[in-house]
Amino acid sequence: METKNWKWFKYNEVFTIKKGKRLTKADQINGNIPYISSKSTNNGIDGYIANGYTDENCISFACYGCIGEVFYHSGKVWVSDNCNAIYLRNRKLNADIAMFLISIFYKEKYKFSYGMTGKKERLKTFKIKLPINESELPDWQWVENYIKNIIPKLPQKAKSVWNNSFDKKAISDKKFSLNTENWKWIELKNIFKMERGVRLTKPNREKGNIPLITAGLENEGVAEYISNEEMKRYQNAITIDMFGNCFYREYAFCCDDNILVLSNANLNKYSGLFLSTIINFDEYKFAYGRQYRQKNFKQHKIKLPVNQQGNIDYQKMETYIKGLSYSKNI
């Protein structure tokens, strides 16, 4: 995408930014209208209410809490006072334009922190670079067409989400709640074989189709796709990066020296997702100034379900994941 002919606009030149409305838990009535708060999951939905709605067909922008999280809401929602509701000026928002804008908004998340919130008054001073038409105004039609052309190129699962045809069913009817009282603390070094990736500088990367994993949350740490023969291929493994971010990867990949690769003969995509989720609960302990390295791995313990013999119960992990809604799409 070539952006050199795009133009910078202040947010308040292209957006109408509306502060959300406070509604305490005590005042919320159970219903079917999504209540949007400053969450980073579930599209920001913090519950469903019958108190009415404040907004419709908008983008929510978390100004406190998970600052900078943005979600598109095509229907009626109540946007809380922890968020802003964003609309286009002079044009109605739609899913295509919203997805384009959300991708750009996410690039701005680094500007926010606990002491630097995303309140309405501050957002108005921000600038966004957009494609323009002959009148040097934002070319929303180009944006819409660009997204529409991308959809056919998406993986099948992503297309099904976009087309709202995602299978919400579970693989198994077996469901159980997680009671961790009888679980056991186990060191990662006693669960996994660990290997560290190899340093590969950008000038030495050869373009190809093997994902190269590096440190970061964006795109699950996939930096680019390479073909370097000297890089070891892994598959059906869990990765932990220098910031403690953990992902299960069913596909073949290689990784740089900021990544630890954890392998186990009992891993599959169900137990792998279960284990990586448990490990991710400790991600808050690590940051740029306190990186996750081999010494941390050797000291790291997680609590896991065990069978009657006291061994890790991989079957229980798999059964639990298969019983979750949407598991047919894993």
Image (spheres, grey):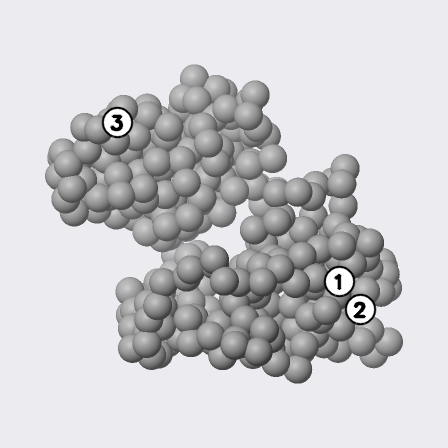
Measure how far apart labels 3 and 2 are at the Cα level. 49 Å
Q: Is residue 141 visible?
A: no
Binning the other alpha carbons within 10 Å of mark 1 as few (below 14), some (14 to 19) or many (20 upward) gives many
Q: Helix, strand or loop at disc 1?
A: strand
Name the residue located 29 percent from the left edge and 73 percent from the top edge.
169
The answer to which of 17 and 323 lies nearer the viewer is: 323
Q: Is residue 159 left or right of residue 53?
A: right
Disc 3 target residue: 24
Name the residue located 75 percent from the left edge and 66 percent from the top edge.
189
The answer to which of 119 and 227 lies nearer the viewer is: 119
Instruction: Give the image quarter of residue 201.
Output: bottom right
Binning the other alpha carbons within 10 Å of mark 2 as few (below 14), some (14 to 19) or many (20 upward) gives some
Mark 1: amino acid? Leu
Disc 1 target residue: 260
State the image coordinates of residue 161 (x, y, percent, origin top left).
36, 65
Q: Is residue 70 left or right of residue 285?
A: left
Measure how far apart labels 3 and 1 are at the Cα level. 43 Å
Mark identifier at residue 65: none
Name the residue located 35 percent from the left edge and 79 percent from the top edge.
171
Name the residue located 42 percent from the left edge and 76 percent from the top edge.
319
Q: Is residue 31 left or right of residue 322?
A: left
Tell me whether circle 1 and circle 2 mark residues in contact (CB < 8 Å): yes
Number of marks in the rendered image: 3
The numbered mark, 3 or 1, whose residue comes first in the sequence reads 3
Mark identifier at residue 195: 2
The answer to which of 61 and 21 lies nearer the viewer is: 21
Q: Helix, strand or loop at disc 3?
A: loop
Q: For the view shown, which residue lies furthest in the top direction?
A: 121
Seen in the picture, residue 135 relative to 249 is either above or below; the reply is above
State the image coordinates of residue 29 (x, y, percent, origin top left).
15, 36
